[in-house]
Amino acid sequence: MSSKSKKQQENDGKLVKASASLQQIADSNITPRNIRKIVKDSITVLQDTKLSVAVRAANAISMLDEVAQDPNMPSFARVTLWSAVSELESIRE
C-alpha cells in the first residue's frame, strides 16, 4: 500500500471518529440548541467531499472553537468537543 493511500485511510478514520463524537453532542438533549446547531453544521462541513480532508477539518475546527467557549455548554459536551477537535487537528495531508 502506498504511503499516500495509507495517510488517506488514517485521515478518513480520524474524520469518522471525530464525526461520531460530534454526533453524540448533537444528539444529546441536555446540549443547548444553539450549540447543537453549530455542531451539526460542523458535521455537515466534515462530510463535504468537494473539499480536501484537511480543509474540511480546518473549517470544522474554526466553527467548533467559538462554541467551545460557550459557558452554557455541559461539561461532558465540552470534553467530547475537545476530543473531537484534537482528532481533527491531527489530520494532515
Image (cartoon, grey):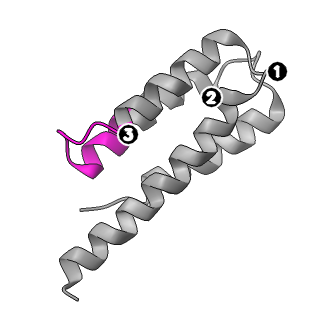
- What amino acid does circle 2 point to? Ala
Tell me the residue that label 2 is attached to.
68
Q: Amino acid at mark 1?
A: Ile
For the residues bearing labels 2 and 3, Cβ distance under 8 angstroms: no
Q: Identify the secondary structure beneath mark 2.
A: helix
Which one is earlier in the sequence, the residue at label 2 or at label 3? 3
Which mark is on residue 60?
none
**Rendered image quadrant of residue 70:** top right
Q: CA distance from mark 2 to mark 3?
A: 17 Å
Q: Position of residue 88 (x, y in %)?
A: 45, 51
Which of labels 1 and 2 is toward the front? 1
Residue for badge 1: 30
Question: Measuring 55% from the left and 16% from the top, which residue is drawn there?
Answer: 37
Alpha carbon separation for disc pair 1 and 2: 15 Å
Q: Which residue is mark 3?
A: 46
Q: Identify the magenta region.
A: 46-59
How far across and how far down the image is residue 93, in percent? Answer: 23, 62
Q: Earlier in the sequence, mark 1 or mark 2?
A: 1
Percent position of residue 73, x then y: 75, 22
Q: Is residue 85 visible?
A: no
Whole-percent x, y for residue 25 in the image? 68, 32
